[in-house]
Image (cartoon, rainbow, N blue to C red):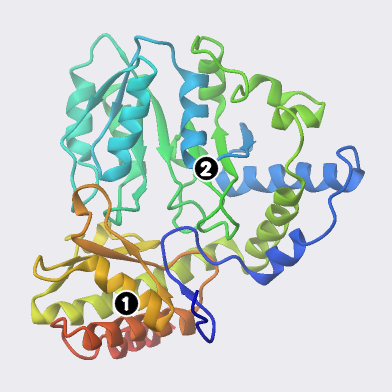
């Protein structure tokens, strides 16, 4: 392995940068499972997560698993084989989520996948309006698809459910959006939110969460899919070691507690505003690069563009994988590639988690340098456009 001087600029949409404070909090000896300190950190973290999710009437379940594990937890706690769910097509992760529900014997209704924008809420409403028998048990929506970089309107989906008087649960995958984009569960009538640790929560991969509201907790009582490790019920017992179906993830709890402290210190509204600023700067840079015709923002409607990640389409005559490799190996900037239908057709710039203005400007300027070094046609001045966008937002 060749030494690369300086620090790596990590701008994938997850894993994201882990702050030094979180690393230091975890870099200590483990402690006994019954130590009061561990109990305090666990209980206080769950309490703060309830506030962050706007789910103080519900429960938070913590898993040592990635987001796919949290998906499975939600499925087995809420459904029985043969039931029906609706997963609107919204990019790569709606497709893979539908495959998972199908693997459990759940009838999965999908809509045509939109690879360049958000969920069509009108189409969701139309499907629900024809389901007079209420066979659809849940609408399962990806809030921000990391592949397309589109963010869908969750509030509008709840309003659509209410307009047609449909009893379905509203379940949201917020792995890429939680703590970067507003998603208040109670205010918006969301019954289950699924997320992971490695994005805007500023932790390393490996911890994921189910935030279950009262309606989801009631539905759990009727669900018959087999479950043990994923089971919510024992994780609500007073014996806190049951919260993890065994040994507590001590170091992860230390890190979670520190990350939540950092979010509280900044203030969640300021966190949201910071993500909006960095996203606006990124979009401004790409708009300039796009002037030469070889690049374009994947999401066509500015209102649907994510505050977490930006997907950039690249003309077929250029190799997006080769471009990303050159950035990583030669310039020490790590960005992500396309997924699903966008594989080998796009690159993705993450701008979520522990990032500030100098970091995003450094990344964008280096991407522009990479475009010039590889002679990929692009409008000049993308970094300057990002600076102007940040100055305007300041």
The image position of residue 394, as x and y in percent, is 44, 83
Number of the label disc, if any, that sits on residue 253: none
The image position of residue 366, as x and y in percent, is 35, 84
Q: Quadrant of residue 168?
A: top left
Q: Is residue 40 left or right of residue 185?
A: right
- When the figure is inspected, residue 199 is found, relative to residue 74, above or below; the finding is below
The image position of residue 121, as x and y in percent, is 23, 38
Find disc 1 in the rendering and name its residue: 326
Nearest-to-viewer mark from 2 and 1: 1
**Which one is nearer the viewer's eye here, 69 or 279?**
69
Q: Residue at x 77, y 46 (%)?
A: 250
Mark 2–mark 1 distance (CA, rounded to whole Å): 29 Å
Q: Residue at x 46, y 47 (%)?
A: 175
Label 1 neighbourhood size at 10 Å, few (<14), some (14-19), many (20+)? some
- Secondary element type, mark 2: loop
Mark earlier in primary sequence (2, 1): 2
Is residue 393 visible to us here?
Answer: no
- When the figure is inspected, residue 315 is found, relative to residue 195, above or below; the finding is below
- When the figure is inspected, residue 164 is found, relative to residue 142, above or below; the finding is above
Q: Is residue 188 left or right of residue 231?
A: left
Q: Is residue 252 left or right of residue 231?
A: right
**Which one is nearer the viewer's eye here, 286 or 339?**
339
Q: Quadrant of residue 330?
A: bottom left
Label 2 neighbourhood size at 10 Å, few (<14), some (14-19), many (20+)? some
The image position of residue 132, as x and y in percent, is 23, 12
- When the figure is inspected, residue 72 is found, relative to residue 76, above or below; the finding is below
Number of the label disc, if any, that sits on residue 66: 2
- Secondary element type, mark 1: helix
Q: Residue at x 31, y 71 (%)?
A: 324
């Amino acid at each position: 392995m060749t030494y690369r001087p300086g620090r790596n600029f990590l701008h994938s949409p997850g894993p994201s940068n882990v702050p030094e404070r979180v690393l230091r909090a975890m870099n200590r000896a483990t402690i006994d499972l019954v130590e009061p300190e561990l109990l305090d950190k666990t209980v206080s973290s769950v309490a703060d997560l309830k506030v962050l999710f706007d789910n103080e009437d519900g429960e938070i379940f913590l898993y040592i698993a990635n987001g796919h594990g949290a998906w499975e937890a939600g499925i087995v706690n809420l459904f029985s084989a043969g039931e029906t769910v609706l997963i609107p097509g919204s990019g790569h992760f709606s497709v893979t989520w539908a495959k998972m529900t199908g693997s459990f014997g759940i009838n999965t209704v999908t809509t045509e996948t939109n690879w360049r924008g958000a969920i069509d809420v009108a189409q969701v409403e139309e499907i629900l309006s024809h389901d007079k028998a209420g066979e659809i048990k849940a609408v399962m929506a990806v809030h921000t698809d990391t592949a397309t970089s589109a963010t869908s309107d969750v509030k509008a989906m709840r309003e659509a459910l209410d307009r047609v008087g449909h009893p379905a649960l509203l379940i949201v995958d917020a792995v890429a959006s939680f703590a970067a984009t507003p998603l208040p569960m109670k205010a918006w009538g969301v019954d289950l939110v699924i997320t992971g640790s490695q994005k805007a929560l500023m932790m390393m991969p490996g911890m994921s969460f189910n935030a279950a509201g009262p309606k989801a907790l009631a539905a759990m009582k009727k669900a018959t899919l087999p479950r043990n490790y994923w089971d919510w019920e024992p994780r609500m017992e007073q014996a806190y070691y049951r919260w993890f179906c065994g040994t507590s993830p001590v170091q992860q709890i230390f890190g979670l507690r520190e990350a939540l402290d950092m979010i509280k210190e900044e203030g969640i509204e300021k966190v949201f505003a910071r993500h909006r600023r960095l996203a606006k700067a990124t979009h401004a840079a790409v708009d300039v690069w796009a002037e030469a015709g070889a690049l374009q923002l994947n999401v066509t409607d500015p209102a649907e563009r994510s505050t977490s990640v930006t997907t950039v389409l690249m003309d077929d005559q250029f190799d997006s994988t080769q471009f990303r490799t050159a950035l990583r190996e030669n310039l020490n900037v790590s960005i992500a590639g396309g997924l699903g239908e966008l594989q080998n057709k796009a690159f993705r710039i993450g701008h979520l988690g522990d990032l500030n203005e100098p970091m995003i400007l450094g990344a964008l300027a280096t991407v522009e340098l990479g475009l010039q070094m590889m002679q990929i046609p692009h409008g000049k001045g993308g970094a300057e456009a990002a600076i102007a966008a940040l100055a305007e937002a300041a």
